[in-house]
Amino acid sequence: MKFVLLFGPQAVGKMTVGQELSKITDLKLFHNHMTIDFLEPYFGFSPEMWRLSTLFREEIFTSFAKTNQYGMIFTYLWAFDQKEDWDFVEKVCEIFSDADIYFVELEAGVEERLKRNTTQNRLEHKPTKRDIVHSEENLLSTMEEYRVNSDVGEIDKEHYLRINNEKSSAEDVAQMIKDRFGFE
């Protein structure tokens, strides 16, 4: 089994690249908003929503890791200055300890990400992003509050790839990932 952790800041293209990678491989996409957007109508953006989202994700990972599926792509905004995010990634790696784990980091400038924040695909698949003003404010404040891209050399993993996808299509980035890691 293969597990791809596709991470980077908001609106960098994680879900869209994940969708394209899923189309050209046997990997299944589980983007982080699948739990967020499910729970937010009931709990808002509260600590309880985040707690339940983490629990749901861990249960899904645990069950999926026991299957004979080819693998999973999971998208994640990793705050590198937050211990709980490192702990979450470590927990996910433990769950997929029998799998080959791949770390793919996307990066793009803020102006490009602000454009991507309003794309039809993003708004279609992420209901909580449809309030564009709020979503843009959150994107900008998150950049100020957290470090959402790793420092050079910080991710010391055998299967790690960092891509600046500012000028690349999601299809091209997905193909780069597939080729680099030899995914089927």
Image (cartoon, rainbow, N blue to C red):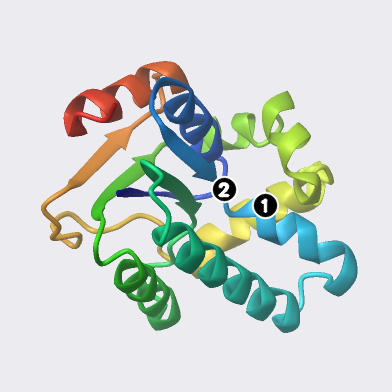
Residue 99 in the image: state x and y as whole percent. 26, 56
Residue 169 in sight from this viewpoint: no
Please tell me how crowded label 1 is: few (under 14), some (14-19), or many (20+) other residues with Cα within 10 Å.
some
Asked whether, in this view, residue 80 is left or right of residue 30, the answer is left
Identified at 42% across, 74% down, the residue is 88
Numbered circle sitting on residue 84: none
Please tell me how crowded label 2 is: few (under 14), some (14-19), or many (20+) other residues with Cα within 10 Å.
many
Where, by quadrant of the figure, is residue 148 drawn? bottom left
Asked whether, in this view, residue 38 is left or right of residue 58, the answer is right
Residue 47 in the image: state x and y as whole percent. 70, 82
Q: Marks 2 and 1, how far apart in space?
A: 6 Å
Q: Which one is in front, 110 or 1?
A: 1
Is 178 situated above or below 76?
above
Identified at 62% across, 70% down, the residue is 56
Q: How many marks?
A: 2
Q: Which one is in front, 77 or 81?
A: 77
Residue that mark 1 sits on:
34
Asked whether, in this view, residue 169 is left or right of residue 121, the answer is left
Residue 80 in sight from this viewpoint: yes
Residue 120 in the image: state x and y as whole percent. 74, 25
Name the kind of residue labelled 1 in the image.
Answer: Met
Residue that mark 2 sits on:
31
- Asked if the residue at tag 1 contacts the one at tag 2, i.e. Cβ–Cβ closer than 8 Å, the answer is yes
As helix, strand or loop, the secondary structure at mark 2 comes to loop
Q: Residue furthest front?
A: 68
Name the kind of residue labelled 2 in the image.
Answer: His
Q: Which quadrant would the C terminus be assigned to in this image?
A: top left
Identified at 38% across, 41% down, the residue is 107
